[in-house]
């Protein structure tokens, strides 16, 4: 198996912490990579425009790593140590969570006419439904990534609001 993939059993035995990061950048096949990058191309461009490249990178990495750490906890507590997980979905759901926070923060239609209702419908209903309907999808990473992104959004937008109020 790929040395970058997060293999739960090996992670627990050897505690290879770097797998929490490298698995965010690994994918199981070209279709998996293409689907993630297509969503990232759209949401990533919007996020970077909204919060800047360094904050975007921070939210992306924190969401992806946090989603992977939660996945390890989840699968260990489920007793399923044979799972291997990889992909950018936890990080991408973090960006989606950030945009959900942005919709709450602005209370209006955001960039390119995405409404809060559309974002929640797309992220929560369609993507999670897809995850539960198909086998082999790490829904734990999706859910935790979205929560982490939402919390990062609270922190970022409160700081941006404070900076604007102080004239920075």
Image (cartoon, rainbow, N blue to C red):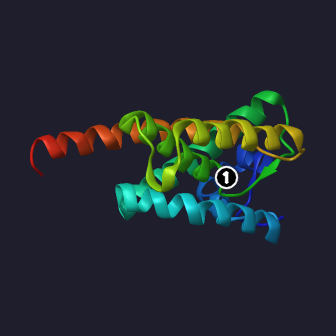
Residue 11 percent location from the top left of the image: 71, 48
Q: Residue at x 9, y 48 (%)?
A: 167
Q: Residues within 10 Å of mark 1 (few under 14, many from 20)?
A: many
Q: Is residue 125 left or right of residue 113?
A: right
Q: Is residue 27 visible?
A: no
Circle 1 sits on which residue?
Answer: 89
59 relative to 75, above or below: below
- Residue sticking out furthest to the left: 167
Residue 91 percent location from the top left of the image: 58, 52
Residues 52 and 144: in front is 52
Residues 115 and 52: in front is 115
Q: Is residue 54 left or right of residue 165?
A: right
Residues 50 and 131: in front is 50
Q: Quadrant of the N terminus?
A: bottom right
Q: Is residue 155 visible?
A: yes
Q: Residue at x 81, y 67 (%)?
A: 31
Q: Residue at x 19, y 39 (%)?
A: 162
């Amino acid at each position: 198996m790929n040395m970058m993939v997060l293999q739960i059993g090996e992670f627990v035995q050897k505690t290879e912490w770097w797998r929490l990061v490298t698995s965010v950048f690994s994918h199981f096949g070209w279709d998996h990579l293409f689907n993630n990058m297509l969503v990232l191309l759209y949401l990533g461009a919007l996020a970077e425009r909204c919060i800047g490249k360094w904050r975007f990178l921070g939210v992306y990495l924190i969401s992806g790593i946090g989603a992977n750490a939660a996945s390890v906890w989840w699968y260990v507590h489920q007793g399923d140590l044979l799972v291997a997980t990889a992909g950018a979905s936890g990080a991408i759901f973090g960006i989606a969570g950030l945009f959900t926070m942005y919709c709450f923060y602005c209370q209006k239609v955001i960039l390119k006419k995405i409404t809060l209702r559309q974002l929640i419908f797309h992220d929560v209903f369609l993507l999670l439904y897809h995850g539960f309907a198909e086998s082999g999808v790490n829904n734990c990473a999706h859910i935790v990534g979205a929560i982490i992104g939402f919390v990062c959004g609270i922190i970022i937008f409160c700081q941006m609001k404070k900076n604007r109020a102080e004239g920075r």
